[in-house]
Amino acid sequence: MSNQITSGQRSSTKPSRSVAACFSASRFRISRSRQSSNTTSARTPRPRFGLNCRRRVCTCSMPTTERSKLVCNPLVDSLWIGSNLKMALGRGETLRLVQHVAGLDDGAQRALVVSMPFLGESVAAAQGSGLRIGVQGCSTHDRGAYTGEVAAQDVASMGADFVMVGHAERVALGESLESFAHQVQRAREAHLKVLVCVGEEAQGDHDSDDLITQVRLIAGGQFRHGDVLAYEPYWAIGEAGREAPVDYIDARMTRVRSALGEDVTLVYGGSVNEGNCAQIASLDGASGVFVGRAAWSPAKWSGIEARVRGESQ
């Protein structure tokens, strides 16, 4: 079943050559006749859950008899932890991390976005585990005379679970929101899930409704069973990225959550580390964390997961 927000009319845009240009196009699409008052119906806040609890409703203090009556939907109720490996890790490092994460016990949804050359071996290493393996993009085209492109159906044939779309580093290389929308379409035609990234170029540069507009333009406002939406402020990504204040993250994710609904897996990425991951994962609007270099080794991954799950201080 899909979760749908009201779709605005989709406009085509020329491919942008910078993050700024991309967001200029995004802003152009947003109606400037917004009502001064917020017309979105009030959302009933979800209870905060304990750091060692992986449910939307915390059961830590419930009597055992009551807790046993709850049925856990692992795609909605469990904590999501993922990492985009970019082009940072070689074959050996990638496979060691995949093998480590695949061998962890149950209790969290885990995902790794690997470099394309290591896809087949990563899928094989993760086989039989709950670890989901994805790639960092796909072609906007079907098979054909498109040198250097990789078709979504070929990604699917190699066993990938999902395609990541919309990352800030792809925007910086000239990919547009329109291009991302075509990638989502191709991925879904190949029966792949999508991990859609949205964010703003500068802190405070856009309001939360602009994030929702990006979702509409890229994914048509629809998220299907197993899809993930990652909020990643562009200014918080990479070696020069800055940590976003937790209250800033909370406000934006709460607004996006209110528009998309409770069933969407909504995660935060951008300078996530051992020092802030537990607090971010415990936010009402968050389903988990999307980590970068702070999780790029077995030891680092375990450190992040232990913090988020409340097993380490």
Image (cartoon, grey):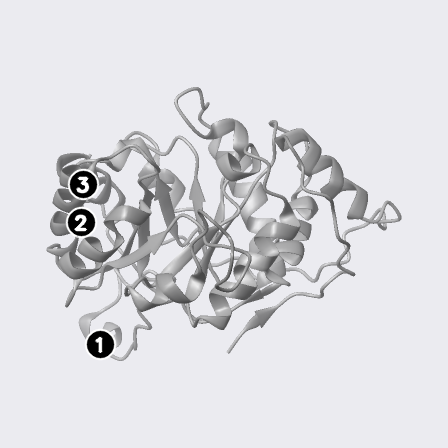
Q: Residue at x 44, y 44 (%)?
A: 268
Instruction: Tell me how far mark 2 sits from mark 3, CA to CA.
Output: 11 Å
Q: Determine the image quadrant of residue 298.
A: top left
Q: Earlier in the sequence, mark 2 or mark 3?
A: 3
Identify which residue, 57 or 259, lies in the foreground. Answer: 259
Three-letter amino acid code of the residue under disc 3: Arg
SS assignment at label 3: helix
Identify which residue, 274 or 311, lies in the foreground. Answer: 274
Q: Position of residue 21 (x, y in %)?
A: 70, 33
Residue indicated by mark 1: 68
Three-letter amino acid code of the residue under disc 1: Ser
Q: Residue furthest front?
A: 145
Residue indicated by mark 3: 91
Instruction: Tell me how far mark 3 sits from mark 1, CA to CA.
Output: 43 Å
What numbered label is drawn on residue 98? Answer: 2
Three-letter amino acid code of the residue under disc 2: Val
Q: Sort mark 1 into few (<14), some (14-19) or many (20+) by Cα contacts within 10 Å.
A: few
Number of marks in the image? 3
Q: Are marks 2 and 1 in contact (CB under 8 Å)?
A: no
Q: Earlier in the sequence, mark 2 or mark 1?
A: 1
Q: Residue at x 47, y 59 (%)?
A: 46
SS assignment at label 2: helix
Q: Residue at x 18, y 71 (%)?
A: 64
Q: Is residue 224 visible?
A: no
Q: Earlier in the sequence, mark 3 or mark 1?
A: 1
